[in-house]
Amino acid sequence: MTGVQSAPSATIVIFGALGDLARRLLSPALVNLACAGLLAHDTLIIGVARADGNDQTLRDALDQFVENESDYSHLRNRIVYIRGDFDDPATFTAIADRCLGNAIFYLATPASYFEPFADRLAVAGLLDESRGFRRIIIEKPFGADLASAQALNRKLLEHADEQQIYRIDHFLGKETVQNLMVLRFGNTLFDAAWDYRHVDHIQITAAETVTIGSRGKFYDATGALRDMVPNHLFQLMTLVGMEPPTGLDSDAIQDAKAAFGEAVRPVPASDAIRARYGAGMVGSEAVAAYVDADGVDPAGVTETYAALKVRIDTPRWAGVPFYLRTGKALAARDTTIVIQYREALPKLFDHGGAPADRLILQIQPNEGIQLEFVAKTPGPTLAIAPIVMDFRYAKRFPIDRQTGYETLLYDALVGDRTLFSRADHVEAGWRMVAELQAAWAAEDAPAAYSAGSAGPFAADTLLSRDARHWYPLR
């Protein structure tokens, strides 16, 4: 973010300031912004939580991420902690006494607090923009289905304008994800080949090696579909599939995203599979079956893996399926977008089983872009071999300390909503899976796959029936 002006003066209020999200991602992101000179020197950070603590508690939480004290010292003395219950009006009164100008309110809390927070912020006058901007940042899950997402949107819009609401998806802070717009619309080579005439199909994968760990009770009420598909994967699919926006301003990009969302067909149960992991080995670690984890109902039907075939009703993607998959306790941590091109015509060369050209965007863990194609091998015969051109962000740019939240926090401070979700687009994501949610709720337990594998056999069948196969996890 070199050469970018610092954000305007503001108070940043983080509810749930001592929780996991704040500790792992928000705290280092704030430190990185401060050290890069992108926070105004009079920025005030207020952490709010129920746990015992004081200003020093919160400062210690951020200190561990500081490498250059001189770049950070101006912010450290402007970090304060408020201990209070989220349902106590006195907590919000204490916040209001310190918020005298611009402010953003980051809800790093369980989703059950989102609707009550809207009421309590409004009652305390914290959403009144007469003395400066007031913005709410909301983490996923934004609803549990279409009806609850619509209800949450209605509640928020009772007290705030759409322009004040920043629905955050941390995947959109990844450099490779942000680069999708540049890759597509800034390069003639890719822009010209981004449609049904050249693309056979598209795969979007979000694979994790981690199990549900100690989050059994939460995850058993959520599952892989709800946790990942209508938000993270839907957002990635939108950036791949949307039409060129009329401009680079936030409204133009949000309009393009919303138009794509309207063109996504609901997914029927016949175009999706689900499963959950059984016992196995993830790397060198033995993993117990999902149903044996603490907090999990062994008689329940929650899935830890989901794969879908999605159809898009636009001329650009006529006949081109989007395949989405996500799961836990898999063989590799791997989030990728694969653009699989059609075979060249006429077929002059024998590929010897090598695939047609592919463009691979690696979102995590090693952000980058690969282009796979074929080239002639040295020698007197006209033989070909697969070749990979590989670009890695970390080799070209200093991004090793970034969490992905830096850009999102900065954008919220300057009022750029490009990387955030509008209400209609959030609801489109839930509409895509609504039919599937209803069907799965009435089904028996999911199929099984071994922990440490690439997933269930049925996921392979989802593609093999179309004479296609998944790009391997790496």
Image: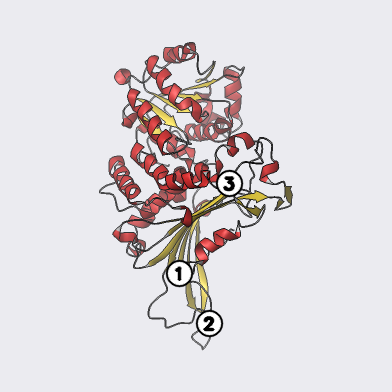
- Amino acid under disc 2: Pro
Q: Rounded to the nearest whole Å, what is the CA distance between mark 1 and mark 3?
A: 33 Å
> Which amino acid type is shown beneath numbered disc 1?
Asp
Residue 378 - label: 2
Q: What residue is rendered at 55% in x and 47% in y?
A: 443
Q: Residues within 10 Å of mark 1 (few under 14, many from 20)?
A: many
Q: Secondary structure at mark 2?
A: loop
The amino acid at mark 3 is: Glu
Q: Could you tell which of marks 1 and 2 lies nearer the N-terminus?
A: 1
Nearer the N terminus, badge 1 or badge 3?
3
Q: Residue beneath label 3, please?
A: 303
Describe residue 253's horizontal placement relative to residue 138 as left or right. Answer: left
Of residues 391 and 115, the one nearer the viewer is 115
Percent of width and height locating residue 271: 47, 56
Of labels 3 and 2, the one closer to you: 3
Q: Which residue is labeled 1 in the image?
A: 357
Mark positioned earlier in the residue sequence (3 or 2): 3
Q: Nearer the viewer, residue 156 or 43?
A: 156
* Res 300 label: none
Q: Residue furthest left?
A: 246
CA distance for labels 3 and 2 = 50 Å
Dot 3 crowding, Cα within 10 Å, few <14, some 14–19, many 20+: many
